[in-house]
């Protein structure tokens, strides 16, 4: 029999409202953290994840446009260039993936998902393809499908902290709080200074009534966040 999901108390809409926080509180809003628990859900800020994977410098390399198209290449947008590449070779998985990233950043999720899936149909064991497809599916509210692809990404790169963190967030959003707790602990094992993982683990522990441990992880999240802010270069 399939394993029954462990779900938290409260409605799905309540969990989503709790998940709306972008990050742990900084020094200037520390008092607010005492009143409101925040969950740094990556799946509500997926553009940041996607943007980090798109290397515009590879555009010309991936497209390999002919010399006759050099004028078009100089004036076309990256998206148009990838469409040209796909018109020439519909099985170009890199072009499908990179076009998917651009569409994802633009909020065109249906098209992005379509191109990610086309990329995966050509190259099934690519971590980035699974991870960003999962991110787009999560943004569409298709949490169960997102969880499936985050897990597939982790089969390829088991110790990738981003995919582990994203999977934890997706599980929490789906009401699988105990499974989410396990994922956040795994992120912390991989990167002990991951402030949002400490914060999200605190939220998950609070949901299951483990208040003493929850406060310990929340305080550590605050400490790490403060430490990271103090290490950032000061702007003039």
Image (spheres, rainbow, N blue to C red):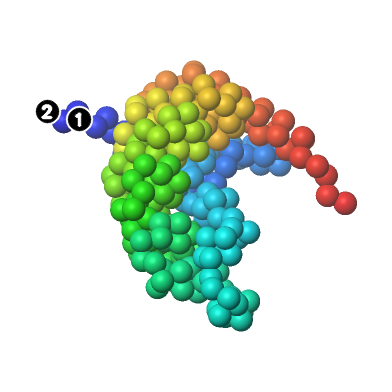
Give the answer, above or below, for where 127 lies relative to 187.
Answer: below
The residue to which callout 1 is attached is: 4
Picture residue at 58% right of the left edge, 64% below the top: 60
Q: Can residue 120 be seen in this view?
A: yes
Count of number-bearing discs: 2
Question: How far across and down, in percent of the image, does residue 124 sit?
Answer: 33, 46
Q: Name the residue under label 2.
A: 1
Q: Decide which of 57, 5 is in the foreground and name it.
A: 57
**Percent of width and height locating residue 187:** 50, 28
Measured in 3D between alpha carbons, the distance from the residue under mark 2 to the one under mark 1, in whole angstroms, is: 9 Å
Residue 186, numbered circle: none
Tell whether label 1 touches label 2 (CB within 8 Å): no
Q: Residue at x 45, y 57 (%)?
A: 94
Residue 158, quarter of the rendered image: top left
Where residue 96 appears, as percent x and y from the top left, is 42, 61
Using the rendered view, name the quadrant where residue 59 is placed: bottom right
Please tell me which residue is depicted at 36% across the width and 61% down the height of the picture.
Answer: 91
Q: Which sits in the foreground, 12 or 56?
A: 56
**Disc 2 vs disc 1: which is toward the camera?**
2
Rendered-image quadrant of the N terminus: top left
Horizontal and vertical percent for residue 166? Answer: 44, 40
Q: In this view, does 158 lie above or below 141?
A: above
Circle 1 Cα neighbour tier, 10 Å, few/some/many (<14 / 14–19 / ≥20): few
Q: Is residue 218 visible?
A: no
């Amino acid at each position: 029999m399939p394993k029954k999901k462990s779900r938290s108390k409260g409605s799905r809409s309540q969990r989503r409202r709790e998940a709306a926080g972008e990050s742990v509180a900084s020094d200037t809003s520390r008092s607010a953290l005492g009143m409101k628990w925040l969950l740094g859900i990556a799946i509500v800020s997926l553009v940041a994840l996607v943007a980090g994977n798109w290397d515009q410098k590879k555009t010309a390399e991936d497209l390999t446009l002919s010399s006759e198209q050099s004028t078009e290449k100089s004036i076309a947008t990256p998206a148009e260039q990838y469409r040209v590449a796909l018109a020439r070779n519909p099985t170009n998985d890199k072009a499908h993936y990179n076009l998917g990233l651009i569409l994802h950043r633009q909020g065109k999720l249906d098209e992005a998902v379509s191109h990610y899936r086309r990329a995966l149909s050509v190259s099934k064991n690519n971590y980035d393809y699974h991870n960003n497809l999962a991110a787009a599916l999560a943004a569409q509210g298709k949490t169960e499908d997102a969880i499936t692809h985050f897990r597939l990404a982790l089969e390829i790169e088991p110790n990738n902290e981003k995919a582990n963190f994203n999977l934890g967030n997706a599980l929490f959003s789906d009401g699988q709080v105990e499974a989410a707790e396990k994922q956040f602990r795994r992120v912390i094992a991989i990167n002990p200074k991951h402030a949002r993982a400490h914060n999200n683990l605190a939220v998950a522990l609070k949901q299951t009534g483990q208040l003493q441990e929850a406060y310990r992880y929340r305080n550590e999240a605050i400490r790490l966040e403060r430490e990271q802010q103090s290490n950032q270069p000061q702007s003039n």
